[in-house]
Image: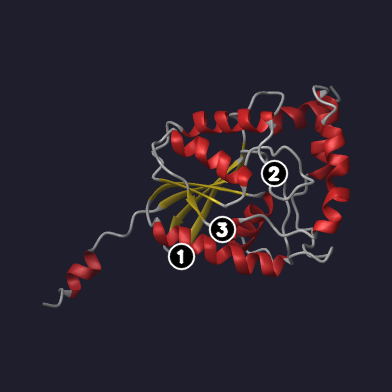
Amino acid sequence: MPRDTHDIASAPPAPPLLLLLVRHAEQATMQVRDAELSARGRRQAERLAERLAHLPLTAVVCSSMRRALATASAVATAHGLAPEVEPDLEEVRINESTRAARYKYREAVARMEPDEANYARAAMAGVRVVPNVVWGSDGGESGAALRERVMPAMDRVIARHPGGVVACIAHGGVINAVLGEWTGQTRDMWFVPWHTGVSSVMVSGAERVLLGVNDASHLSRDEDMLHLVAAHVRGT
């Protein structure tokens, strides 16, 4: 029997989805595309799991890359969940012939720790808050191709989880592509998602409300972005 149109009109709206876009913990090396977590990365994953343990997570989604899966596993275990793998959420596909040269300097600076000033300088050198990167300039995946791959994957995640609280463990390029698309950027966007930094979005139907970006307050002070950047600004 057909439903009364009044009943359809008065039906409650679908519950919103709280989507947490989280960058994976630190990988052992950036010179290898699919690296395991570093020792520090494993500690970061543990702190992230502790941070999210008190949220009512209903699902944990991640890419198939090892650093994302290991980070997601730490979070999922705390909730008695198993990570859902969405392969198309893997990181932007950089030309492998340029990878080692691109990251050699960054890793050399990172090894200077525990000299926090040097680490802060390395972090500040990469922070950008405006679209100024062009993916694919090295012959790798373009920004348009990245978005064409990633956005349908995010749509699939949202379709599977129309409500609840979902942690999506992904990658810096992926998070930039998603937030850039949802905030109407017309060029490739680049800010630095901190390792295990949490960006939160409320999803309700076609509406996307950005609640917060890059929250990594669960990390210790020698790793948390705000403490490092503040120390750099003060020259300490």
Position of residue 35 in the picture relative to residue 208 (left or right):
right
Which of the marked residues, 3 or 1, is nearer the chain's N terminus?
3
> Hey, what amino acid is under mark 3?
Pro
Going 87% across and 43% down the picture, which residue do you hit? Answer: 104
Residue 35: give its label: 2
Closest to the observer, 21 or 7: 21
Count of marks overlaid on the render: 3
Q: Position of residue 8 (x, y in %)?
A: 22, 69
* Residue 140 sits in quarter: bottom right
Going 46% across and 39% down the picture, which residue do you hit? Answer: 76
Q: Nearer the viewer, mark 3 or mark 1?
A: 3
Closest to the observer, 36 or 54: 36
Q: Position of residue 224 (x, y in %)?
A: 68, 30
Which of the marked residues, 1 or 2, is nearer the chain's N terminus?
2
Measure the alpha-carbon separation of dots 1 and 2. Answer: 35 Å
Q: Which residue is mark 3?
A: 87
Q: Position of residue 154 (x, y in %)?
A: 52, 60
Disc 3 and disc 1 in contact, CB within 8 angstroms: no
Element at badge 2? loop
Disc 3 and disc 2 in contact, CB within 8 angstroms: no
Q: Which residue is mark 1?
A: 206
Residue farthest along the bottom direction in this orientation: 2
> Hey, what amino acid is under mark 1?
Ala
> Hey, what amino acid is under mark 2?
Ala
Measure the alpha-carbon separation of dots 3 and 1. Answer: 24 Å
The C terminus lies in quadrant: top right
Q: Position of residue 45 (x, y in %)?
A: 58, 33
Residue 191: give its label: none
Going 59% across and 62% down the picture, which residue do you hit? Answer: 150
Measure the alpha-carbon separation of dots 3 and 2. Answer: 16 Å
